Image (tube, rainbow, N blue to C red):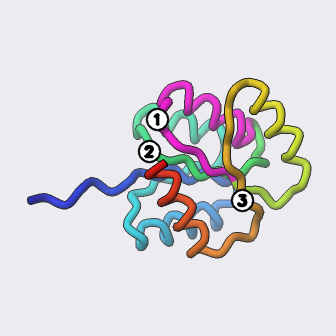
Amino acid sequence: MPPPPRPRVLVADDEHMIADTLAIILNQAGFETATAYDGNEAVEKARTWNPDLLLSDVMMPEMNGIDAAIQICTMFPECRVLLFSGQASTAAMLSDARLKGHHFEILQKPVHPADLIARLRNLRTA
C-alpha cells in the first residue's frame, strides 16, 4: 500500500533565507513544500501547485501575506492558512481581513520549529 500523500505547504516570505530554511525544516518533518518570495509569487505558485496549507509572512513588498492568503483561499477554499509576523502593526490588517470573512491564525516571529510544525499539523486536521 503506498504511503499517504504528504501535506503540501506553500511557504511565502520575502526573506529568502527564512523561506528556504522553513521549507527544509518542513520537508524533514514530512511535508512537501514550495517557496515563494513575495505575495504575488505565492498566488501564482498556488494556481499551479494547489497547496493544502499556506505559511506566509504578513509584511512583504508588492502584496502582503494577508492579501495573498485571501486570494489563495478564494481559489482553494480548503487551503488552511498560518501567518507569521515580527511586527505589531499586523493587527489592523488582520482585523480588516476578518471583516471580509477571513479568519487567519497568526504566529509571532521568531517561532520555534517544533511549535510551527505542531500548529501546521493541527491546521491540517482542523
Residue type, mark 1 in image: Glu
Identify the residue at image location x=86%, y=45%. Answer: 91
- Give the image location of residue 92, x and y in percent: 89, 39
The residue that mark 2 highlights is 52
Residues packed near mark 1 inside 10 Å, few (<14), some (14 to 19) or many (20 plus): some
Which residue is painted at 83% across and 36% down in the image? 95
- Residue 27: % across, % down: 42, 67
Q: What residue is disc 1 on? A: 78
Q: Which mark is residue 107?
A: 3
Marked residue nearer the N-terminal end (3 or 2): 2
Dot 2: what SS?
A: loop
Closer to the chain start, of discs 2 and 1, is 2
Q: Is residue 72 magenta?
A: yes
Q: Which residues are magenta?
A: 63-83
If the image is split into quadrants, where does the N terminus sit? Answer: bottom left
Q: Earlier in the sequence, mark 3 or mark 1?
A: 1
Nearest to the observer: residue 58 or residue 96: 96
The answer to whether mark 2 and mark 1 are in CB contact below 8 A is yes
Above or below, comparing residue 22 to residue 100 in the picture: below
Label 3, secondary structure: give it.
strand
Residue type indicated by callout 3: Leu
The spot of residue 37 in percent (x, y) is 63, 50
